[in-house]
């Protein structure tokens, strides 16, 4: 299974179109793409007025097009710029299968399984709404527990997606409420990665005992600077682009690309690795050879 993750893309500017073309180019070069995950801030500027608003064409339908992008679903989460009005029409657009039918947002937060391996879901993803009023956070934490502790075969990979990151080396910094409340929920449910945006850059942050923090918020808006790297900063770049994940039952590959479709860096995670992301998600060299473990 192959997915692209990109956030903060909904500017309608040339930069968004460049990243969209790069996404199509990479999918064509690699010959695989099953879905795209939008990480919020899907519509900047004037709020959507309806499910027929022209912004649907200029910031989604016409931007992400081509042999690959025109045939895959786009699973979206809400960002702070999607509130306080646009979120209503983003949900309706998905529920009513408007436009090309690619936009997927059945509710403000939701979960879905993808793929199957020997009767087990290959990936279970929880899509969160961290831009909703904070009083809804407990409801979403309960939802995470229900999704990952449900009876039945356990998923091979566990991924969450949200607009706001938990860990962040960018100018927005970390939100204490998410660190205090969302992080423990992700940890007790053995979530492997959190995909997020909000900071307009690319980051991969790794801390022992925590999910991999994959920030891909460079999809089309003005870029943000980064703080001085720390030991947790596996990769940081203030460049437009996106992240791509390729998964099977044995391993996960995470790669970052720029807005020309050039590979910036890539990592691989063997499913049978005994540690969490800090010890298991290891860099590849230019030939795709795995680096030695840091543990």
Image (cartoon, rainbow, N blue to C red):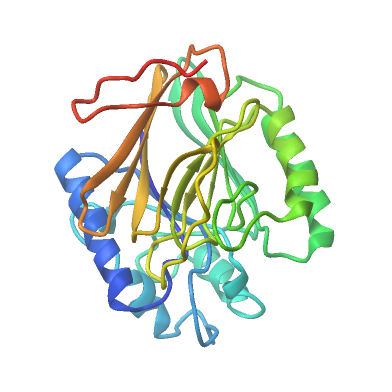
In this rendering, would 265 be left or right of 129? left
Where is residue 167? Give x, y as percent: 62, 46
Left or right: 31 in relation to 220: left
Q: Residue 25, position in %: x, y?
A: 18, 53
- Quadrant of the image occupied by residue 266: top left
Residue in the foreground of this view, choosing between 226 and 127: 226
Position of residue 99 in the picture relative to residue 113 (left or right): left
Q: Name the residue at 53% across, 27% down.
A: 277
* Vertical comparison of 272 with 8: above or below: above
Outermost residue, left direction? 29
Residue furthest out toward the front: 228
- For image coordinates 37% across by 70% down, the residue present is 60
Q: Nearer the viewer, residue 231 or 155?
A: 231
Foreground pick, 284 / 192: 284
Please provide percent x and percent y for residue 242.
Answer: 36, 53
Q: Position of residue 4 (x, y in %)?
A: 37, 48
Question: Is residue 103 in view?
Answer: yes
- Residue at the spot 41% in from the left edge and 76% down from the top edge: 11
Image-based side of 31 in relation to 227, left or right: left
Q: Where on the picture, by quarter, is residue 213? A: top right
Quarter occupied by the N terminus = top left
Q: Is residue 65 visible?
A: no
């Amino acid at each position: 299974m192959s997915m692209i993750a990109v956030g903060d893309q909904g500017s309608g500017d040339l930069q968004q179109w460049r990243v969209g073309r790069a996404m199509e180019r990479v999918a064509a070069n690699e010959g695989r793409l099953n879905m795209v995950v939008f990480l919020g801030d899907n519509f900047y500027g004037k709020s959507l007025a309806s499910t027929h608003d022209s912004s649907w064409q200029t910031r989604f339908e016409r931007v992400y097009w081509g042999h690959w992008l025109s045939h895959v679903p786009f699973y979206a989460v809400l960002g702070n710029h999607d509130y306080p009005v646009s979120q209503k029409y983003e949900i309706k657009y998905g529920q009513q299968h408007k436009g090309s039918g690619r936009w997927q947002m059945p509710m403000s937060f939701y979960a879905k399984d993808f793929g199957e391996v020997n009767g087990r879901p290959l990936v279970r993803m929880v899509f969160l709404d961290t831009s909703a009023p904070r009083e809804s956070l407990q409801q979403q934490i309960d939802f995470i527990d229900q999704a990952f502790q449900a009876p039945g075969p356990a998923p091979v990979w566990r991924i969450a997606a949200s607009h706001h990151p938990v860990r962040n080396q960018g100018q927005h910094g970390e939100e204490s409420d998410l660190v205090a409340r969302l992080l423990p929920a992700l940890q007790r449910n053995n979530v492997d990665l959190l995909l997020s945006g909000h900071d307009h850059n690319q980051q991969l942050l790794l801390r022992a005992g925590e999910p991999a923090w994959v920030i891909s918020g460079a999809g089309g808006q003005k870029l943000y600077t980064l703080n001085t790297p720390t030991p947790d900063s596996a990769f940081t770049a203030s460049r437009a682009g996106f992240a791509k994940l390729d998964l099977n039952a044995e391993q996960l590959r995470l790669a970052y690309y720029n807005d020309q479709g050039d590979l910036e860096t890539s990592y691989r995670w063997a499913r049978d690795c005994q540690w969490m992301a800090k010890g298991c998600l290891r860099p590849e060299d230019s030939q795709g050879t795995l680096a030695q473990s840091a543990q």
